[in-house]
Image (cartoon, helix red, strand yellow):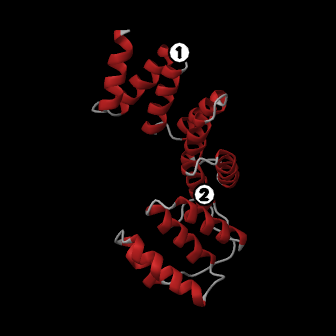
Amino acid sequence: MLKGKEPLQSWTCDSRADEPMKRHDYRESILRHERFLEKNPGDALALYHLGYAYGQTGDHGMEAFYYEKAINLGYKSDQIYFNLGMAYGELEEAGKAISAFHRAIKMNPRSADSYFGLALVYQRIERAHESAEEALQKAIEIEPGFLDARLNLSLFYVDTGRPEKAREQLRRILEIDPAHGMARDLLEKIEKK
């Protein structure tokens, strides 16, 4: 089930094509979706699912290709744009990834995941430090218990020479999850300096 706002038009994917995906048999799911799409080439939901299956096999080029096809047929939701942003991020196509995440955020401004994905892309771009920090802070504002965002922000602060801000985030992580080993180890490392 998609999170966020659903597309206006409804499509129905073949349940026999989706069934292997539930078992994490993505290769079989790809084959079944492709067969279904031979007879139903305009089914944007099936194209979305096919892209997702390709992404799960690590083929992010095909993943993005099928998401784009689904979008071009009118399938628009914050989740497909989030997935498209992640795919383009894996392909190191920062401009396309940023654009996709911005579209996801426009459709669902309360998606902490979309801000987090956007921050990951910004962190890969030199000189985008402020944008990465803002996106991580927004993800945490939306979802205070988003530990990956807090840990990433902590690492960001270490990398940009702000250990006190890193300590603050790491302590907050440990308040939420006292057994968080990475946060504990990083905090100990910072405090030894």
Reply above or below: 148 against 80.
Answer: above
Quarter placement of the C terminus: top left
Local packing at callout 2 (Cα closer than 10 Å; few below 14, some 14-19, many 20+) is many
Which amino acid does the dot numbered 2 rest on?
Answer: Leu
Relative side of 46 to 148, left or right: right
Look at the numbered disc 2 and give the secondary structure of its residue.
helix
| Residue at x 36%, y 68% (from the top left corner) | 24
Residue 12, image x and y in percent?
Answer: 57, 82
Which amino acid does the dot numbered 1 rest on?
Answer: Gly
Reply above or below: 136 against 69.
Answer: above
Reply above or below: 66 against 87.
Answer: below
| Closest to the observer, 166 or 8 | 166
The CA span between labels 1 and 2 is 32 Å
Query: Residue 84 — which label?
Result: 2
| Residue at x 65%, y 71% (from the top left corner) | 70
| Closest to the observer, 134 or 176 | 134
| Residue at x 60%, y 53% (from the top left corner) | 88
Residue 186, image x and y in percent?
Answer: 36, 23
Q: Are marks 1 and 2 in contact (CB under 8 Å)?
A: no
State the image quarter where residue 56 is shown.
bottom left
Reply above or below: 181 against 36.
Answer: above
Relative side of 176 to 106, left or right: left
Query: Residue 126 — which label?
Result: none
Residue denoted by label 1: 161
Residue 64, image x and y in percent?
Answer: 60, 62
Q: Which of disc 2 and disc 1 is earlier in sequence?
A: 2
Residue 157, image x and y in percent?
Answer: 52, 22
Look at the numbered disc 1 and give the secondary structure of its residue.
loop
Q: Residue furthest left?
A: 179
Q: Residue furthest bottom?
A: 39
